[in-house]
Every structure is written in C-alpha cells, then in structure tokens.
Amino acid sequence: MVSTQLIVVIVLLTLPVTASATVGFSPMSVVSASDYDGAYSTNVDTVSAETQTPVGSVRFAHSPDNFPLTDAHGNPVDSNQELYSAETLETVDKPPLASEPSWVDSDGDGLDDRLELSVGTDVSSSDTDGDGLDDLAEVVRYDTDPLDNDTDDDGILDSTEFRLGLSPTVSDATSGPDTDGDGLSDDLERRIGTDPTLQDTDGDKLSDGIEVYGAPHLFPGADPLRKDLYFEVDAYHTTTVNWTALDNAAAFFASAPVENPDGSTGFSVHFVVDETNLTTLRVANVSYPARVVADFDRADSGYQYIFLTEAVFIGDRQVRATANGGRIAIAERDQTDRLYIHEIAHLLGVHGSDSPGVDSYEASIEEYPSIMSYAYLNSDLPVQMATGDESPKSNDDWEDIRRRFTRWVDTSALDPPGKSARAVAADRR
C-alpha cells in the first residue's frame, strides 16, 4: 500500500496594523525680537473602514479519492484549481482601527492645540506670556513658566536672562551698591560684563539698566554690550513697508567698523513697525516739522522716527526722502536699502559740512566712493562708506558716525526723577 501524504495549507487571517503618526519639528532658535518661523508638520496614515478578509481559510493542495476537495461552502472543486479565486474573497465590513489623533497647531509654535489648552497657553499666540521665548521652548526645553514672562520675578524677562547668561528661574535681584546709578547692582553688572562705573557701557545712550529691564518689550533685542539703534516706523495707509530694504540696511550697519565693549564690531538697527494705516500726512514736508511726524508714540524714549508716505517735499521741491532731527520721511516708491542707509547715516552724523562730496555731485565716485555722495548713491556699485583717505574731497564717514552716533537719540522720558530703570520698563510693558 502506497502511503498518501496530505498537505494542508492554512491561510491566516490578517488585519491592517495600527496607523502611525510621524511628527517632525524644525529646529528653532530662541532669540529676542525674532519670531519662531520653523515648520511643524504632521503626517497621519489613515485606515480604511472596509478591509478585504479571506474566507474559506483551510484548503487542500492534494487529496485522496475518499477525501474530495471542496470549497468553503462544501461544493466540490477541481484539485488543480488555484487555491484562491475571486470567489474565496469576501468583503467584510470592519470598524477602523484606532489611529493617532490628528495634530492641529494653530499658532505654529510646535505645540498641539490640545496640549496648549491643557497647559493653559494661548493656541493663537506662539509666545503666550510675551517674554521672547516661544511656548514650545518653555514647555518642552526649559523650566520657565510659559504663563509668566518673568519666572523668577526679578524684573528681567526670561529671554533676556538666557541671553545675558543668567538663570530665569533664580532671582538676580540684589540690594547691593549701584555705583553708576543705572539700576543694576555692581555685582550683577560684573556678572553680565557691563561696567559698574558707567551708566551706558556701550555708548548708545540707552542705560545698562534700561537695556536689561526694557528687553524685549520696550527695546527688542537690546544688548548692553553692543550698540543698538531704534526706529519707530509709521506708514500712510496707501503705502507698503519694504521689509527687504529695511533688512538689508540693518545688515549693512551690523558689519560697520564701529567697536563695541564685547569685542564685536557693528551696531544693531531695529525697525519697529507701528502704525501702517494712517490717514494723515499723505504728503510730508520737512520745512514744516508738524508735517513730518504723523504718530510718533516713542518720542523721547530712545527711538528715532521713519514715516513712509506717498510724496516728500522740502518747501516747494519734491525729493525722494529727507532726514533731520531724528526723523526720516521717505516716499514709498523710493524705498531702497541704498536710500535708507543714506538717510540713516545722516541722522548718525554724516552731513554736508564734513565734505563737499556729501549730498552733492561735486566729487566723483573715485574721489569720494561713498553712499553719501549723490553720484555713488545713484550708481549700481556696492553700498559702502568712505574712509577719508581716497582724496581731498573724501570724508571719513565712519569716524563721523562713531563721534555722533547718539546725536538725535532722546531718552528723557526714560529717566523720570525718582524712578528706577526697572520701574520704567515695567510701566511700559
């Protein structure tokens, strides 16, 4: 008798695996006066509510005559038939498997809205407490309170403490001597590197105390060891601020050959755009002071002013822009980084009395290769200042800026009698 081998093929029922959610965070750098612009992406695979499940799962590849091959319903089938045909698959409705919840990040700060609601942060603001640190940083990375802009209650906001090398969770308020009267104790000044015998270590006319306590609200990005220059920017409602031109102007001055106490060179220009829908002063005229300033909220508070309008005049003569007395008026269509740099340099101390080439065509580009010359301003040459040794008609523009940097900076409102820098900053938050 010949033995017969029965081969049984068992097909296992399979179900879809659970869906996975991939959450990616872009790197975030925490800096004052800069918003987090990283992307927060979530990809969630979904599961269909309808799954294909094989039935008739036991099949015989070979069978003796006394054990005929049948399908799942008991009907005879040819032994040479394929193990699975379309008839052996039935559609079975199955409930979907639980997947990861969808992620919603309304303010783009890297925190899911549900987590923000649980923590108590604002789903529509990436920095709920306004301390200069994004909610993600405060919830995930640091021990600071995302609902309190000054976690340790020492008067210095959390982001400023990080930037100065202090701890935002340990109070730095001290009652020790304050030799220079800038509102910072001598001990604290030594810790952050400022001079305890100078009220304004970096020479930008903002006291060390106001730069420490006033950042980032009153003075975004203020650094007591590096010169800062602030402009409030207002605009007539039909005009549009050219941010590219402003950014390029700031980058130019950031690399200026002007020395700072921290060993760096250059200075930081900060443009704080305020009103952009003004309906007064469609035309600015520098010959009439009241027709240059539309709505200067930060006057006498360490800021200078830029007004963007449709047209600018000096008396009866139309010009592209003008600068004087800490104010700049510029026509919208003439906004360029070259013109912004030219006008800002005027406020910093470069003017016609220094050289015949300033604001004239009297000197050639070779004689006075500076953006302060009309010939150079209207050329396509790279933006630069002159050093004064190019010719007798040249001017040392940078030396003028070093000597006159604070010429039009008015800080009288920041030093009221009997009020500390900490109190002044707190009042303006």
Image (tube, rainbow, N blue to C red):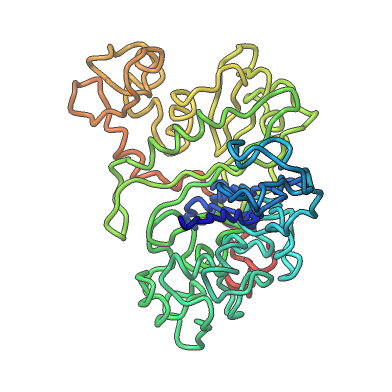
Residue at the image position 39 percent from the left and 56 percent from the top: 203
Nearest the viewer among 57 and 19 is: 57
- Asked if residue 289 is positioned above or below residue 159 in the image, the reply reads above
Residue at the image position 51 percent from the left and 66 percent from the top: 160
In x, y percent, where is residue 38? 54, 47
In x, y percent, where is residue 174? 50, 86
In x, y percent, where is residue 4? 50, 55
- Asked if residue 77 is positioned above or below residue 394 in the image, the reply reads below
Nearest the viewer among 149 and 342 is: 149
Nearest the viewer among 16 and 254 is: 16
Nearest the viewer among 326 and 113 is: 113
Residue 299 appearing in the image = no
Residue at the image position 52 percent from the left and 69 percent from the top: 141
Residue at the image position 47 percent from the left and 23 percent from the top: 339
In the picture, measured across the screen, residue 270 lies left or right of residue 392, that is right
Q: How many marks?
A: 0
- Asked if residue 297 is positioned above or below residue 238 in the image, the reply reads below
Can you name the residue that lies furthest to the bottom here?
175
